[in-house]
Image (spheres, rainbow, N blue to C red):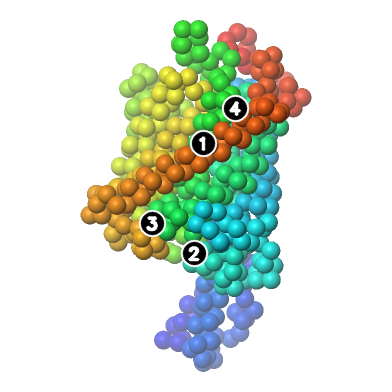
Amino acid sequence: MMKNINVSLVAAVVLLGLVMPGTVPAWAADSPGAAEDPSAVAAKLADLKVTMDTVWVLVTGMLVFFMNLGFACVESGFCRTKNTVNILSKNFIVFAISSIGFWLLGWGLMFGGGSSIVGTEGLWMVSGADNSPATGDAYQGAYKALNWTGVPLWAKFFFQLVFCGTAATIVSGAVAERIKYHSFIAFTFIMTMVIYPVVGHWIWGGGWLQTRGFLDFAGSTQVHSIGGWAALVGVVLLGPRIGKYGPDGKVNAIPGHSLPLATIGCFVLWFGWFGFNPGSTMAADSSAVAEIVVTTNAAAAAATLSATAVAWRALGKPDLGMTLNGCLAGLVAITAPCAFVSVGSAVLIGLLAGAIVVLGVLFFDRIGCDDPVGALSVHLLNGVFGTLCVGLFATPDRIGRAGNPAAKPGLFYGGGMDQLLTQLTGVLACAVYVVVVSAAAWMLLRATMGIRVSAEEEREGLDLGEHGNEAYPYFVASAGGLGR
């Protein structure tokens, strides 16, 4: 038995060395042939598990970071040529802002102890982390809400940082083509330092929602709905783009300039979601990770098909933009329940999400909410829907993955209404907080620096007005219509 353990250990170490050179522990060079004390072998295996879990978390975090490219491509493709530089610049700078804002204050508010409402310990980023760079000790003080994970504190920080950046990016597309660049930067700092972390404390930082059993495995509410609610307030206060609605309320289509670019972006996001959801295990748990990958993919595929079908029926043609947003809607909806539902349930969730996104786009247009990329329908509506799906479809055998004794199975699996009501409570609480704080932030910015560019600049394009350059300087824009 000991020989088998040593052989497996050596094989794992060799594999780790091939994937991540320099990460193999020094003791791996020792000969495995000699008999070792069982307790020493156990300690070595435990060290190896931490190392492999850390590699897993960091690699999946890098996949989530790569999703920034996907958002940049989707948003710029769905917008007009004259605003391409502005969209790309916002999507690029938003992660830099998130990195600084979350490091300065966001992390402490989100994971610091001291209150069920907001973190009050360990503020101004990880003052004790440098003294406890490994595992265990770093999670016994201010950040004890994280003692369930064994990866080093900085690995957990990085993974949460890329999630925070994703939430901030969602706002960019919804307010595109008319927001002032510096006002967007200011709001992003507020988003990453005050809005995202406080709700995150409630859900993942040991706060009151987590105590009640609220479940959001990878962020349908914590990432997507937060971004969606903040974007909705911005859209309402900014008003629609010039020419979007006629005097009689007729909706005028303003097509994006590059569906190929948007399609590439959607593929990047679909790929990145295979880090977004499985990486939230915070460990290389083979059985859980494998199933989460499949539930994630199944929901995306089903939503792609249903969105195409519903759009075909509603619009008379299979609109590619609706197909792309359908895929993203399925991914958003499965993000909260991905670890708690079967593959069959994931398909059903995806089918419903695809229909919701098409109907949502038509609904927001009808009420005068101008969202150039469909972010409200994708992230807000399906973030809410996916969160509620936990209370409907979570199975008794999978609910244990939450590590939360207060959580219960879904309504359709014998759990009654308890978990569904808990999920609904979380959705409403997060909506109220994000809408109130976002409204205060947007109105403060509007009163001080302004949030909307001038009508002249909007007609000319934000690329020239805000940045002084163009994405396609040698291309001749087509004349007429609502703009390039």
Q: In this view, does 25 lie above or below 330?
A: below
- Amino acid at dot 3: Gly
Task: Decide which of 209, 343 is in the foreground and name it.
Answer: 209
Residue identified by numbered label 2: 283
Considering only order in the chain, which callout, 2 or 4, is on the residue closer to the N terminus?
A: 4
Residue identified by numbered label 1: 435
Quote the CA–CA distance across marks 1 and 3: 23 Å
Residue 176: which numbered mark, if any? 4
Quote the CA–CA distance across marks 4 and 1: 19 Å
Residue identified by numbered label 3: 213
Q: Nearer the viewer, mark 2 or mark 3?
A: 3
Residue 340 locus on image (x, y percent):
35, 55
Quote the CA–CA distance across marks 2 and 3: 21 Å
Residue at horizontal 33%, vertical 47%?
421
Residue 26 locus on image (x, y percent):
64, 79
- Amino acid at dot 4: Ala
Secondary structure state at the residue bearing disc 4: loop
Residue at horizontal 47%, vertical 53%?
203
- Amino acid at dot 1: Val
Residue at horizontal 70%, vertical 29%?
448
Considering only order in the chain, which callout, 3 or 1, is on the residue closer to the N terminus?
A: 3
- Contact check, label 4 and label 1, Cβ < 8 Å: no
Q: Is residue 81 above or below residue 59?
A: above
Considering only order in the chain, which callout, 3 or 2, is on the residue closer to the N terminus?
A: 3
- Amino acid at dot 2: Ala
Quote the CA–CA distance across marks 4 and 3: 37 Å
Considering only order in the chain, which callout, 3 or 4, is on the residue closer to the N terminus?
A: 4
Task: Decide which of 334, 241 is in the foreground and name it.
Answer: 241
Q: Nearer the viewer, mark 2 or mark 1?
A: 1
